Image (cartoon, rainbow, N blue to C red):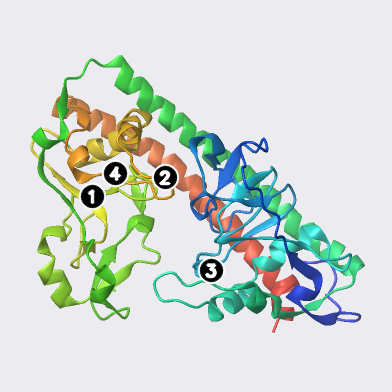
Amino acid sequence: MLERPISKAGWTRVAFGDVVRLSKARVADPEAAGIERVVGLEHIEPGDLRIRRWGDVADGTTFTTLFKPGQVLFGKRRAYQRKVAVADFEGVCSGDIYVLEPANGRLMPELLPFLCQTDAFFDHAVGTSAGSLSPRTNWTSLASFEFLLPPIQEQARLLEPLLGVRTLEEGLGAALEIGEKTYEAWIESELKDHDWPVRPAIDLLTRATVGIVVKPADWYVSSGQGVPALRSLNVLKNRLSWDDYVEISYEGHEFHQKSALRAGDVVIVRSGRPGDAAVIPELDHPLNAIDLIISTTGPDLRPEFFCRFLNSVAGRRQFASGIAGTAQLHFNVELFKKLRIPVPPLAEQDVFIARAQQFDGTLSGLRTRLADAQELKKMILTECVAHELH
């Protein structure tokens, strides 16, 4: 991918901590300090170096770790999620995020985020993580990671293709963001332009319950040894992620039949980021849920329409009014039953769903192109950097 072969001449073996330092800057009262944005792990997308989402300090936060533009944010909790980003604004972030910067002039600042994205670095971070349910790596372990550091001139040469593919990634990411906002605006327009009757959710559902909440870890088994169970991180807006699900024993699945999932069920996040909802697709295996709201719609409400309303601004506004908690946002299943749901005739629901799925096709195409760009970056990293790492 480079015009001439990479020479190792002048490359020196260093430890990560020799050229990178951990920022320990803190701010006791972010709002008083004029800081407006707060970043948690949920705001960093795997593989995307740009921070596209954040929270508002004015809404309340317990985070005090300060970051500034140009610094690198690395998710130390569940490092296998590969969450790395470069800040382009000032803010505070979760204590589960390390704020990194070059320690001296030996490493170009622009190369640091790419170094943190290599397989070797992630393998080291994961391999040195401790804990079962929420493993974390520590700075001492990260600082011990060794790699071959090119001379500054060679670093600048390696950066050219990496920055090019990052520009491509950011362009596709921006297009995806615009597409998602256009979809949301269309949803809002549809809800405002129709005088559809509104009914409480409890009147439209045949089931509204919650997944396993009492010591779910007691039922965990190794991968391939039990029944998959979805958690909040598996539920995104209008879609599911099958990454990082857990499995519970067959005995646990039978014991918790009330939270067993079936095709057409709508699952909703109730803790952390309440309101995100997705429809369970056709299944060829049993499935359960942990700490999710589980609902089954009745004959007057299509699951897909219900799900998309819950994910709309209007739906989330109702969730926001019933959210409790500060550090950990939470929504009660009893409040969920009281949500006010618009109920178009089934034929109109079907038209709505068909149009929404057209948006899905466009957004899915952009996500695929973005994934391809990220794979290209990985190939460049392998050729330029990763193969030089132990």
Mark 4 vs mark 1: give the one in front: 4
Q: Distance of mark 4 from mark 1, alpha carbons?
A: 9 Å
Q: Earlier in the sequence, mark 3 or mark 1?
A: 3
Report the residue marked by disc 2: 326
Q: Earlier in the sequence, mark 4 or mark 1?
A: 1
Q: Earlier in the sequence, mark 3 or mark 2?
A: 3
- Crowding at dot 4, Cα within 10 Å, few <14 / some 14-19 / many 20+, comes out as many
Mark 2 vs mark 1: give the one in front: 2
- Given the image, on which type of amino acid does mark 1 rest? Ile
State yes or no: discs 4 and 1 in contact (Cβ < 8 Å). yes
- Crowding at dot 3, Cα within 10 Å, few <14 / some 14-19 / many 20+, comes out as many
* Marker count (numbered): 4
Report the residue marked by disc 1: 293
Give above or below for 361 relative to 284: above
Q: Distance of mark 2 from mark 4, alpha carbons?
A: 12 Å
Instruction: Locate residue 8, reporting x and y percent.
Output: 85, 81
- Depth check, front residue: 37 or 374: 37
Report the residue marked by disc 4: 331
Report the residue marked by disc 3: 79
Q: Distance of mark 3 from mark 2, alpha carbons?
A: 25 Å
Q: Is residue 273 left or right of residue 28?
A: left
